[in-house]
Image (tube, helix red, strand yellow):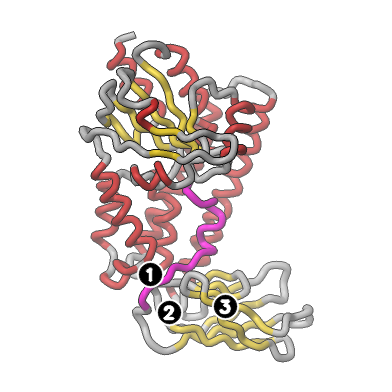
Amino acid sequence: MKKYVALVILALAFLVVSCGSGTTVVVGDFGKKRAPDSVSVIISGGETLRFPVVNGQFTAEIPTTKTTSALVEGVYLIPDGNKMSIDFTASEPILDPKKSEINKRVIEFLETENGILKERNQFMVEYQDKINKRELVSPEFLGVYSDIQGRLVDLCNKTIRENLDNDLGAQALKMIYHDLKDTEISGILDSLSPEMKGHEFISMLYMELEKRAQTSEGHMFADVIIPAHGDFPEAKLSDYIGKGKYILADFWASWCGSCHVILPRLKRIYEKHKGDKFDILGIDVWDNPKDGQKSMKEHGIPWPCILGTDVLVADEYGINGIPTLILFGPDGTILHRDISAKEAEAILEEELGK
């Protein structure tokens, strides 16, 4: 799960240098439905253009560039220079891409993605229900989530390969980059068109890769101080890491369903190895500390957690999605990072010899 909710991701357009010229014409029709006086077109990460609606119809002229996107009354499209139309007469607006091959792929991607995300959301409802009822969560049940997420990754990888020169490829990458190894991300970045190198999200990825390189395996941990806020006192990573224990740091948030999925295995690891040589440290990121505190109680998390770190720790370690696990050695050396709970279990079995 990403820093931002997945369903919102494709509603974001990023500020980049336009790689095209001229305008892309998008016409729309509300038919007999009550229409607004004007329609909004959100481009370039927040800039809003407005176009009048006359007799239920409008014509929007949007600056042409494939490296960003436009939201026309909430309808995502890439202004690639081809004329398009949107039918607002039905219960849901329908984009007709006409000759735009890119936007044909947009429609196909969004329809398939929506189906997969509905499955994932339903899984999380069922998972939360099991947690609330304190039912045993079987490996077979968790395997359903792995299958769903695997299909999403396959879809996004295919979309990236087909859209290396436009915003759809960047948005598909944003959906799954937390599931990819850094070498895989670097390979994708190297394959992008020169124009896409200036995309805001792509630039952010380059910076994250650099941060992760600085906190990669073999490096000493980077300390971070989290200031006191409200009822929560100041905290430092060095309060826990580098104190003679193996520390498995779990980056999580109260709203992160995927973080809750791995809790049964983490609890098993904790119960087996807790003591003078090992502990788990929860690091609550991109979250309200009170929500994190409530989630700890609801899910029965027994290990210490640093709450309300916001972006401080995540940015320092180049964390791009959660859950993320990092294993620190007794002296604070980063032994393993970006590992799965299953991998952490096997590594600790070998390290601690129990």
Q: Earlier in the sequence, mark 2 or mark 3?
A: 3
Q: Earlier in the sequence, mark 1 or mark 3?
A: 3
| Amino acid of disc 3 | Val
| Amino acid of disc 1 | Asn
Cα–Cα span, label 1 and label 3: 19 Å
Label 3 element class: strand
The secondary structure that dominates the magenta segment is loop
- The picture quadrant where one finds residue 244 is top left
CB contact under 8 Å: marks 2 and 3? no
Compared to residue 302, the image places residue 40 above or below, namely below
Cα–Cα span, label 2 and label 1: 9 Å
Q: Which residue is mark 2?
A: 80
Q: Earlier in the sequence, mark 2 or mark 1?
A: 2
Q: Which residue is mark 1?
A: 166
Of labels 1 and 3, the one closer to you: 3
- Stretch in magenta: 1-17
**Residue 157 appears in view:** yes
Front-most of 104 and 221? 221
